[in-house]
């Protein structure tokens, strides 16, 4: 066995193996590596986009929350304003009702006063007639002296 021939055969076999690998094995491996590199780059870009979108969504959520709080404050202010308005209306209605009741009571008092005065006039007239009758010691005819008794009632 000749070492030169063996070395030459191994060198030729090695070069054929290298050519075969570069021609048929290396391109699919390089293509797979390129695809994998592209996938990784796309994944990282998607992660960055997601992070950016998350920040934007967080800002939008904060803005919506601020708007909702502002609207709630406006609604509460309107409700307070309406409540104050209703209280004022109720006060006005109560005052009007109170005034009406006072006027009714005053009218009732005036009527009762007139009735009491009339009753007192009748009683005083009766007492006056009884007193005059006792003084005169004779009976006074109420029908005959009706005009005189009415005049006495009106003077009292």
Image (cartoon, rainbow, N blue to C red):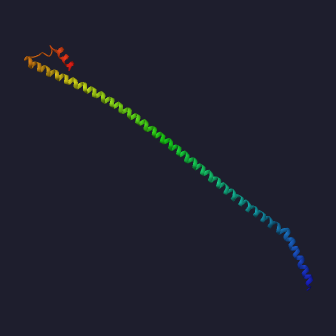
Residue drawn at (22%, 26%) of the image = 116
Q: Residue furthest left?
A: 137
Q: Is residue 10 left or right of residue 65?
A: right
Q: How many marks?
A: 0
Q: Nearer the viewer, residue 52 or 34?
A: 52
Residue drawn at (92%, 83%) of the image = 4
The x and y percentages for residue 36 are: 75, 64
Rendered view: 75 above or below 131:
below
Give the quarter of the image for residue 101.
top left
The x and y percentages for residue 17 are: 86, 74
Give the quarter of the image for residue 34.
bottom right
Q: Is residue 41 left or right of residue 134?
A: right
The x and y percentages for residue 73 are: 53, 45
The x and y percentages for residue 62 are: 60, 51
Rendered view: 60 above or below 134:
below
Q: Is residue 34 left or right of residue 116?
A: right
What is the quadrant of the C terminus in the image? top left
Give the quarter of the image for residue 123.
top left
Residue drawn at (74%, 61%) of the image = 41
What is the quadrant of the N terminus in the image? bottom right
Residue drawn at (55%, 48%) of the image = 69
Q: Residue furthest bottom?
A: 1
Q: Nearer the viewer, residue 22 or 139?
A: 139
Q: Is residue 84 left or right of residue 109?
A: right
């Amino acid at each position: 066995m000749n070492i030169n021939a063996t070395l030459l055969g191994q060198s030729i076999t090695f070069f054929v193996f290298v050519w075969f690998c570069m021609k048929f094995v290396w391109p699919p491996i390089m293509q797979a590596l390129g695809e994998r590199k592209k996938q990784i780059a796309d994944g990282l870009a998607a992660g960055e986009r997601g992070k950016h979108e998350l920040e934007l969504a967080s800002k939008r959520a904060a803005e919506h929350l601020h708007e909702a709080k502002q609207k709630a404050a406006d609604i509460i202010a309107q409700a307070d304003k309406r409540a104050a308005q209703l209280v004022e209306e109720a006060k006005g209605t109560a005052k009007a009702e109170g005034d009406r009741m006072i006027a009714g009571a005053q009218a009732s008092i005036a009527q009762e006063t007139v009735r009491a005065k009339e009753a007192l006039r009748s009683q005083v007239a009766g007492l006056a007639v009884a007193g005059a009758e006792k003084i005169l010691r004779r009976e006074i005819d109420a029908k005959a002296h009706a005009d005189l008794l009415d005049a006495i009632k009106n003077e009292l």
